[in-house]
Amino acid sequence: MTNMVRSLAFAAVFAMVLAAIPAMANEISVPEKPTFYKDVLPILQENCQDCHRPGGKNMGGMVAPMAFIDYKDTRPWAKGIAKAVSTKSMPPWDASPEHAGVFEHERGLDDAEIETMVRWVSTGASRGNEADGPAPLEFPDTEGWSIGEPDLIVRMPEPFFVPDDLLDATHYFKTTLSEEDHPKDRWIKAVEFRAGSAAVHHIIARPIGGIAPGNAPSVYREGYSAKLPKGSEIVFNMHYHKEPGAGTGVWDQSEVAVVFYPEDYVPEHVLTTDPLGTFAINIPPHAKDYQAQAELTFESDVLISQMMPHMHYRGVAAKYNLTYPDGKEEVLLNVPEYDFNWQTSYRFKEPKFVPKGTKVTLTGTWDNSEDNPFNPDPSKNVTWGEATHEEMMFGWISYTNPEEDHTGHSGYSKRTQGQN
Ligand code: HEC
């Protein structure tokens, strides 16, 4: 072969490769000019309407501000939708792709779905024919609780007035369960929060639930539970956030509902939830990759059920690592783009068995630089504190002991560091 022929042959192969690229793009079957009803609505129904509908799901205080039910609702948001899906900020899900298929209620769009939405917008966001679209989804009556009729509703002890000038603040309210409302220890089956006003940004009611922004109503796996002892003190940690201004003040009295297992029920698995974390946080001004760690070691075999990393505005990543007794390491949960607004509880589809002596190491990363858009003030030195402009790191981890279940015993782990 002469050089000339060789390079021609190469050019021909190269041209074939180039020609194959658009063919590959077509393989994910995205229409040239997607229409709302035929192509986009099915994706919205499956991935967005749970939250984006009138009276959509209240995710620990996060309620989607707009509905994507029909063309009229959705069209004004077209550009925002294209951006949100291509940057993967929507639907919210911050666990690393390495965990695909591992956790319950996973959210996410595949490449073809993203391309369909983006192309719909770039080709003019056309309506198409309503008859080509799927039937509207039916949603449960939003007046009711999605967990069913509650056995116990706990309210903030009194209404709180969120003042006109408030932009962002955290307030605590305590109430003790009365003999009348909660006469005996009971096993929790499900928990659902209801914000008392639009100024509620998140609610945590310890010890009923660690429900933070972005958490769905939580229903325990059948056979799994945590106990709510009688006489418990319930602490509402209320984070309020709104635009300040005359007339923007609102009254709030948020509540949490609980459904219990039947009275004589003995759960097979008693969940222990550990706040794996540290108070030793001291982030210098403008520091970009500040890290802190905490560890715990399981003193028995355990089945790990779920994890929920919790940090504040400057938190950008959280990672749970396992070190097995033989020294082998494994990533339990990696959240490379932690988002304060979407504090997801990552629950395994199948609880994960780890043997006695396994160590869990939680590493949190903070960005106190001006590059972090959520950073309220990069010039501040930031230490541990309850307000969201201070920092926290708790890596909630819930597990059961397969040997010693239904004893209600709590704490099968030993903290070896970071819990000062
Ligand atoms: C789990 C509930 C939930 C799901 C599922 C969800 N959203 Fe959202 N969405 C919200 C909430 C709450 C907000 C407002 C707060 C915020 O921006 O985080 C929002 C905001 C938005 C915004 C405003 C701009 C932005 O990015 O914040 C767009 C656009 C959007 N969603 C599009 C979508 C699309 C498209 C889908 C489906 C592919 C979707 N969302 C799925 C809850 C949800």
Image: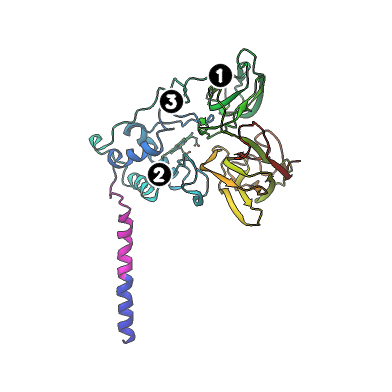
Residue topped by disc 3: 55
62 relative to 117 in the view: left or right: right
Callout 1 secondary element: strand
Secondary structure of residue under mark 3? loop
Question: Of tags 1 and 2, which is closer to the observer?
Answer: 1
The residue positioned farthest toward the right in the image shown: 420
The residue segment tinted magenta is 15-33
Toward the bottom, the furthest residue is 2
Residue 174, position in %: x, y?
A: 67, 21
Distance from Cα at disc 1 to Cα at disc 2: 40 Å
Question: What amino acid is at disc 1?
Answer: Ile
- Judge whether residue 23 is colored magenta: yes
Residue type at mark 3: give it.
Gly
| Disc with the residue nearer the chain's start (1 vs 3) | 3
Task: Tell me which image quadrant ligand 1 sits in.
Answer: top left
Q: Quadrant of residue 127?
A: top left
Residue at left 29%, top 45%? Answer: 34
**Callout 2 environment at 10 Å: few (<14), some (14 to 19), or many (20+)?**
many
Q: Nearer the viewer, residue 236 or 117?
A: 236
Judged by its main secondary structure, the magenta piece is helix
What's the distance in space between the residues labelled 1 and 3, CA to CA?
Answer: 20 Å
For label 1, count other residues whose C-alpha is less than 10 Å away and answer few (under 14), some (14-19) or many (20+): some
The furthest residue to the top:
180
Measured Cα–Cα span from mark 2 to mark 3: 23 Å
Crowd tier of the residue under label 3, counting other residues whose Cα lies within 10 Å: few below 14, some 14–19, many 20 or above: some
| Residue identifier under label 1 | 153
Q: Earlier in the sequence, mark 2 or mark 3?
A: 3
**Numbered label attached to residue 82:** 2
**Is residue 147 covered in magenta?**
no
